[in-house]
Amino acid sequence: MIDEVDRELERWAGNVLGDGLAKVGPLDPAASGRGVSLYLLEVVHGPPSRGARQPMLDLALRYLVTSWSEGPSEAHRLLGELLFAAAASADYEIELGSPPLDLWVALGVPPRPAFILRVPVRRPLPVHRAPLVRRPVTLEIAAAGRLTGLCVGPENIPLAGALVELPALNVRTRTDHEGRFAFSSVPRGPSPLLVRATAKGRTVTVHAGARGAGTDPLVIAFDMTEV
């Protein structure tokens, strides 16, 4: 994709300046004669497409455009012709401003007049379609029930304010003044439901049997010396 843009850019610049004067690539410090360099600096995100029915990858290629010649006037003329041609084209955008000094140092050439030519590029993205459902859809509805319980300490003393949690359901509650707790809607199921209770700095975990099954309150006993 990018190599196609390179070739198209060279053809376009050749039509503006004359064949063979514009080359894609970094500026050669030892270049002689005259010409224009179009050096790809980076690939960046472009503005998002509007109204496209298919997802698109929108990019922009940023080329550093500069020129050289035996004399500055001719180098400036080449650069100016390409600049105004790009400004008049709907296929390109221009960015004006001085490239950072570090860039010239990295390229090994002294600073000179230049501009950034921005080339928008769009490429369709593959669409991953969901497989067709060839069977009737089956919905499984789990029944729900009430889960009640009691937190007690030594000698079956009720523990008020204990934190009781159902980690699998990400729900929690606290015991009342009689140490009782209740969860109004707990899915029934074949697997035991983990219940975790915390009181007086102690944590106890128990399983509530089949989820939501049974009517007897779940008793969670804390083994403490003090309550």
Image (cartoon, helix red, strand yellow):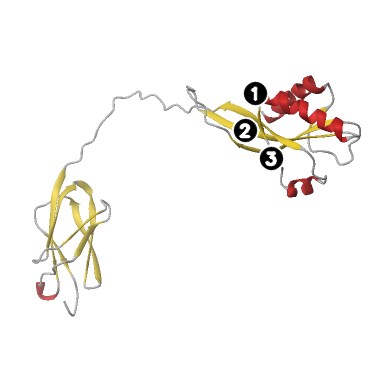
Camera-near label (1 vs 3) is 3
Q: Residue at the location (88% across, 31% down)?
A: 34
Q: Image quarter for residue 24?
A: top right
Q: What is the x, y in percent for residue 138? A: 26, 30
Q: Are marks 1 and 2 in contact (CB under 8 Å)?
A: no
Between the residue at mark 1 and the residue at mark 2, the CA separation in whole angstroms equals 11 Å
| Identity, as a three-letter code, of the amino acid under mark 2 | Ala
Q: Residue at the location (81% across, 23% down)?
A: 17
Instruction: Farthest residue to the top: give it.
Output: 15
Secondary structure state at the residue bearing disc 1: loop
Looking at the rendering, in which quadrant would you find the N terminus?
top right
Q: Residues within 10 Å of mark 2 (few under 14, many from 20)?
A: some
Question: Which residue lies under the disc numbered 1?
Answer: 91
Q: What is the x, y in percent for residue 140? A: 23, 35
Q: Earlier in the sequence, mark 1 or mark 2?
A: 2
Secondary structure state at the residue bearing disc 2: strand
Please tell me which residue lies in front, 227 or 221. 227
Q: What is the x, y in percent for residue 79? A: 78, 30
Please tell me which residue lies in front, 115 or 157. 115
Between the residue at mark 2 and the residue at mark 3, the CA separation in whole angstroms equals 18 Å
Question: Which residue lies under the disc numbered 2?
Answer: 60
Q: Residue at the location (23% across, 58% down)?
A: 165
Q: Is residue 4 above or below residue 192?
A: above
Question: Which residue lies under the disc numbered 3?
Answer: 97
In this rendering, would 209 be left or right of 82? left
| Identity, as a three-letter code, of the amino acid under mark 3 | Gly
Please tell me which residue lies in front, 54 or 114. 114
